[in-house]
Image (tube, grey):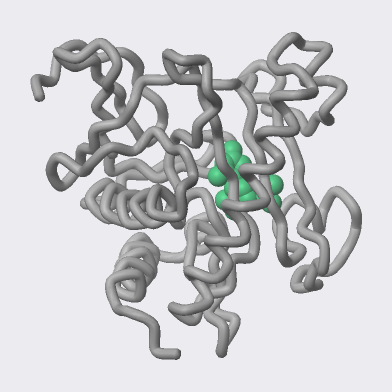
Amino acid sequence: IIKKNLLLEGKTKKIYTTNNSFEILIHYKDNITAFNGLKTNFLQDKGVLNNEITTLIFQFLNSCKIKTHFIRKINNREQLCHKVNQIPLEFVVRNIVSGSMTKRLGVKEGIYLSNPIFEIFYKNDKLKDPLINDHHAVFLGILSYEELNIIYRMTSKINFFLKKYFLDKNILLVDFKIEFGKNYKNEIILSDEISPDTCRFWDKKTMKKLDKDLFRMGFLKEKVFDIYMEVLKRLNVSSSI
Ligand code: C5P
């Protein structure tokens, strides 16, 4: 595979074209950002950890027959993926109340949700990624109701598989954000990354936070790195159950 031109650069990733027009190369950077990019820092080798963590999770989801963009890891910082037209929405799944939901609804962190809550955010920097609903997404011409249904069904399955995957590693999957794109056949597939940057993970026994919340809360960079490393170690160890 030959890496060609920089297609786009985000806060934590760079996307390159390749010699195959249906495939892209995703490069994981060492940046860590929070609060819509307001808080940002350099965290040496974070890209290596997130590339590996995302690889393990997407390999697992591929093995569960979820359609994803992931093809294979190429090196420490890069992975080969199917090219998609990115859908400008973030789908958040909540299994336990935390984060923006506590503030928006004035509810306590830690409440278990027997029915997972799905939220949609419109990816728009100018508008600061507002929370929207299905009807807004259809009105904006981003998706049809039918396509939203496909995404909700996929999201439910992804949550089902990931909850169990992490529980086997003594991690509670509190909430997470996923994104989708359309491939050349116009099929909706899971894209982007799944990592401690995009999920909330709590240790099952101690309820200790194992994710980007530590960075949001102002912990030292070394501590944040150690926690990401711990997540990776746990994913590499097979189930203790
Ligand atoms: O901040 P909030 O509680 O809405 O975040 C819900 C989940 O989505 C968290 O796991 C957070 O890390 C993730 N998220 C993300 N990217 C965003 C916003 C939220 O990965 N832009």
Image height of 227 relative to 31, above or below: below
Q: Quadrant of residue 129?
A: top right
**Residue 37 at x, y percent in the picture:** 52, 34
Instruction: Please report the residue visible at 80 percent of the width from the left and 16 percent of the height from the top.
Output: 138
- Quadrant for the N terminus in the image: top left
Residue at horizontal 51%, vertical 24%?
A: 181
Q: Is residue 82 visible?
A: yes
Residue 30 relative to residue 202: left or right: left
Of residues 43 and 82, the one drawn nearer to the viewer in this rendering: 82
Residue 77 locus on image (x, y percent): 20, 42
Q: Quadrant of residue 169?
A: bottom left
Quarter occupied by the C terminus: bottom left
Residue reaching furthest to the right:
106
Number of marks in the image? 0
Q: Taking 110 as reference, is 87 left or right?
A: left
The residue closer to the viewer here, 168 or 11, is 168
The answer, for residue 43, to whether it is visible in the render is: no
Answer left or right for 142 relative to 52.
right
Q: State the residue at coordinates (27%, 46%).
A: 47
Q: Position of residue 205 (x, y in %)?
A: 56, 89
**In the image, is residue 152 above or below residue 21?**
below
The image position of residue 168, as x and y in percent, is 47, 79
Q: Can you name the residue that lies furthest to the left here? A: 2
Which residue is at 71% across, 57% downward?
94
Q: Is 20 rendered above or below residue 114?
A: above
